[in-house]
Every structure is written in C-alpha cells, then in structure tokens.
Amino acid sequence: MPPDPPSSLPDISATVKILQFGDSMFPVGGFAFSGGLEMAVQLGVVRDRSELAEFVATVAHLAAGCDGVALLVGHRAARAGDLAGIRRADEAVHLRKLSEESRTMTVRMGRKLAEAAGHIVGDSLLDKRFREAAEDRVPVTYPVALGVLFAILGLSEVDAFAVHQYGVATMVLGAAVRLIRVDHLDTQSILYAVNATAADEYRRVAGVGLDDMATFGPVLDVLAAAHVRAHVRMFMN
C-alpha cells in the first residue's frame, strides 16, 4: 500500500501559481525583447560567455533598484486596496524609462499581463487599474502589474520580486542563444549564478520608496538610443 500523505502539506496551489505566472513563456511578449543585448553584441560590448554573464548580472542589478522597487510598492498598495498608490508606482516607472524602447517594453508587457490576468483571474484591482489607464496618461507598467497580480493571487512580495528578477535574466539569456555563440547549458549556468543574487537584491531594495528608485546605467542608455536607429533588428529593444 502507498504511504499515507504527511499531515501537513505544502501550499502546492501557491507554487503552481508562481510557476504559471512566472513562466518565461507566459504570453506577455518578453521573447520580443533582448534587454539591450542585441545592440551590445552589435557594438562589441558583449562578445563571449564571460561578458554575457557580466551583462546579465548588471541588467538584473539595475532592474532591482528601479522596477523592483515599483513592483514592491505596487504589491503593497494592492494589499491595501490603494488604487491611487498603484497608479503612482506606474507613473514612477514610466517617468524613469529614458529610451523610447524601454518605455515601449514596460507598457506593452504591462498591458499584456493586465489583459491576460483579466481573462484568467477575472475582475480585480489590476483590471480596474487597466481600465483607469485607458482614461488617463499613466499606462500600466509591467513590474507594477506583476506586483499587483501576485498580491491578488495571495502570493508574497518576495515571490513577486523573485519572479521579476528571474524574468529579467531569462529575457536577456533567451536572446543570447540567438545572438552569440553560447549554448543552453551556458545560459543556464549564468541564470543559476544570477538567481543566487536575488535574495540580496531584495534585502537591498525592500525598504526603498518610489522617490529613491534609481537606475544608473549610461552604457545601457546609449545602447538603447543606438538601437532605435539600427537598420537591422531582431528584437524590439
């Protein structure tokens, strides 16, 4: 006879929600973006596995200090039922996207996530924010939408932050296998190393507010500006 299940089971439903909405194949369009890698490769900033690892680590670090902060604020606002607080987080993200392509990415992915959540989860605070955004000049942004969605699903802000950081890294690494000479084992090794930094990144930004959101990455800003004018592009940023 099979053994009896343990008296206290882990929350499997929470785990599968994290897996579903944190899946790199979830239909928000992340595959269409490279996180700046395409132009970095074209201009010789990233040429091999070692430089790719440094690039991904840098992108993830910068994302934590900007989008990651807004995600946490959005999650906390959703837990409090504060629609205005969610809107302020969206505005903070949108205003800090210096390049046209970075704004396009966060708005497009935010809209896709909100639309998908409305279809899957139903009416929610995220759906209300999405309808509100259609009437004002502050669009839904991806990190805030992700934080709000995880709050709605009853998942912690730590889970939301982890999924966000994982998604940033997998976006760049997914593009890498199409841009430079690396294989899937290389990218998984890099992903494993970047994942190991997520807890420290969370501790670094957990107490940071919207006014202190910052992302100082001038090389990435220059790459984004150059990519807008590129004649041949595989990715949207």
Image (cartoon, rainbow, N blue to C red):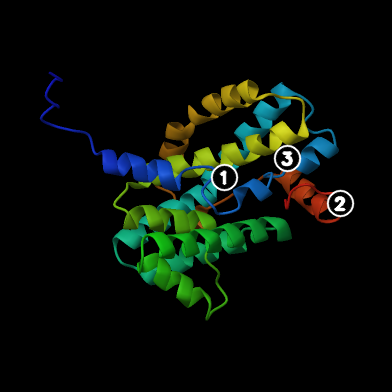
The disc placed on residue 37 is 3
Tag 2's secondary structure?
Answer: loop
Q: As shown in the figure, which amino acid type bears the numbered disc 1? A: Ala
The disc placed on residue 230 is 2
Q: Residue drawn 76% across and 50% down?
A: 224
Q: Residue drawn 36% across and 66% down?
A: 122
Q: Residue drawn 53% across and 66% down?
A: 91
Q: As shown in the figure, which amino acid type bears the numbered disc 2? A: Ala
Q: Are marks 1 and 3 in contact (CB under 8 Å)?
A: no
Q: Residue drawn 69% across and 44% down?
A: 34
- Name the residue tied to disc 1: 63
Quadrant into which the N terminus falls: top left
> What distance separates the C-alpha of mark 2 from that of mark 1?
24 Å
Q: Do the residues labelled 2 and 1 touch (CB within 8 Å)?
A: no
- Which residue is more in the foreground, 69 or 147? 147
Q: Which of marks 3 and 2 is nearer the N terminus?
A: 3
Pick out the residue farthest to the right: 231
**Is any part of residue 91 visible from this angle?**
yes
Q: Which of marks 1 and 3 is nearer the N terminus?
A: 3
Count of numbered tags? 3
